[in-house]
Amino acid sequence: MDVGELLRYQPDRGTKRGREDDPEEPKVLRKERGSRKWLREEDRGTSEDQRNAMDAVPGGEDGEEDEMETLDESSIKRMILTFEKRSYKNQELRIKFPDNPEKFMESELDLNDIIQEMHVIATIPDLYHLLVELNAVQSLLGLLGHENSDVCIAVVDLLQELTDIDTLHESEEGAQVLIDALVEGQVVALLVQNLDRLDEAVKEEADGVHNTLAIIENMTEFRTEICADAAQQGLLQWLLKRLKAKMPFDANKLYCSEILAILLQNNDDTRELLGELDGIDVLLQQLSVFKRHDPSTAEEQEMMENLFDALCSCLMLSSNRERFLKGEGLQLMNLMLREKKMSRCSALRVLDHAMIGAEGTDNCHKFVDILGLRTIFPLFMKSPKKMKKSGIPEKEHEEHVCSIIASLLRNLKLQQRTRLISKFTENDSEKVDRLMELYFKYLDAVRVADKKIEGEKHDMVRRGEILDDDLEEEFYLRRLDAGLFLLQLLCYIIAELCNANMPQVRQRVMQILNMRGSSVKILRHILKEYSESIGDGKSAEFRESEQKRILELVETL
């Protein structure tokens, strides 16, 4: 490309998540650390007449389209070579005249120009291998440490577009080569170092932060195993620092919450690291804002949900449950349930994660100590109207409440267990009535699903089709969607109550079963199926002990 074509070509550099940009505003080189501001137009020495003459090339927009069409391997190689030359020249002049910006200013502007031009490479991901083969990726990564933050931001902008997830999927081979080179060059560590020097009070630098997070999201979406390395390379620490910074809510804070939730998915090492960095306290502090106040915008609500997701993910690690307990997380969630704000549904989900399994024993005891039973049972008796209006499925609410009660029955001992079970005898055993109401509700729902599945299986056998493992798994997932897991929890609660030496509760259960023409046999069958599925992903020892305990309940029903 000649100079005229370079000036005419304006690549589209949209970010993955929207920030307000003025497309008419010229790209300027703003700031060098400890130096001065530079504007593009003042220093190029190109007059208005010269620019108009260059724009008046025959063909106009069609000529531009022709240029786009002729992009090939050789033109990309020339572009990369130009980039390398300008990068080297700028580095050389900076070393030679470190205290005289006028000497290297022009080379810096030229370098910025070619970086902008390289956005066109994102339209042809099949040629990404050229960036790697000609060492351009390493050169770009090297520029992330450039003294002029404008150059760094320009590189971030380019990398964001090159790694756009839709573009990566256009050429699997080209994407793999590029991502391999970025990972090998420790791109996340370099990006984090660059984040530390960006001032978000400056709009362009705030955009640079946003685009940096977009690069990380693109890479982790394309290759999920990058999450663990990214967290270890300083990203997790930076995200926590940015979340607790005393700054107004903005798009970057929302994006930080999203990236944090992504990093914590299915990775115990990252969850442990977050705990060691006092991340549980950071999450609780950020969520405490929503104890008595609803989010003011949809974006702020999204951030709140991301933080709740991150907290739930962390609580899958037993060491973080201890940190949650010490950080008074139970008290905060309990208050959220009582305040009846938008955070209530998510607080219920957090309590479920905190108390489930043997690792939740301490949290279960503390929950009773802080009078949590007074909070949870009204939610058990009736699903809140606000929850229905907010679009949370009733089944999801009932599943979390029943899971919490099942965890309490499993983990509580002595007086606290007695306090829990006695709740079911209050007001003429109304909670037993509600328990049986839910039992028959989900028993009917699962039976409908089972009948439909059996019909489909029968038709497939008749047609000679094979029922493979994938199909069986699909059928099982459909049963879960109908409410199978919740039905199993309800049966477990019923079995625990019937074996708790409370004749009043047991008699009421049997009375309702007889009235509905049902029997204990159905309960036993469901519990046996539950015992076979319990403990997935846990140790064999845990699985065996849980199965034994549930089967003992079945035998004594």
Image (spheres, grey):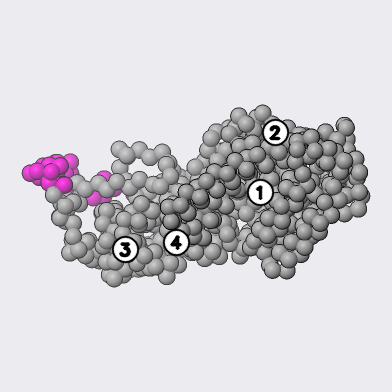
**Whole-Å distance between the Cαs marked 3 and 1?**
44 Å
Disc 4 residue crowd, few under 14, some 14–19, many 20+, Cα 10 Å = few
Where does residue 335 sit, x and y in percent of width and height? 75, 39
Quadrant housing residue 246: top right
Tag in front: 2 or 1: 1
Residue occupied by mark 4: 223
Task: Say what secondary structure mark 2 lies in.
Answer: loop
Label of residue 485 in the image: 1
Give whichever of discs 2 and 4 has the lower sequence position.
4
- Of residues 325 and 48, the one nearer the viewer is 325
**Whole-Å distance between the Cαs marked 4 and 1?**
32 Å
The boundaries of the magenta stretch are 37-65
Q: What residue type is labelled 2?
A: Ser
Magenta span: predominant SS is helix
The furthest residue to the left: 58
Q: What residue type is labelled 4?
A: Arg
**Whole-Å distance between the Cαs marked 2 and 1?**
18 Å
Where does residue 289 sit, x and y in percent of width and height? 66, 39
Q: Is 181 located above or below residue 312 in the figure?
A: below
Residue occupied by mark 2: 383
Q: Is residue 487 magenta?
A: no
Give whichever of discs 3 and 2 has the lower sequence position.
3
Where does residue 200 sit, x and y in percent of width and height? 49, 47
- Of residues 114 and 273, the one nearer the viewer is 273
Tag in front: 2 or 4: 2
Residue occupied by mark 3: 174
Q: What residue type is labelled 1?
A: Phe
Task: Say what secondary structure mark 1 lies in.
Answer: helix
Q: What residue type is labelled 3?
A: Gly
Where does residue 342 sit, x and y in percent of width and height? 64, 35
Give whichever of discs 2 and 1 has the lower sequence position.
2
Tag in front: 3 or 2: 2
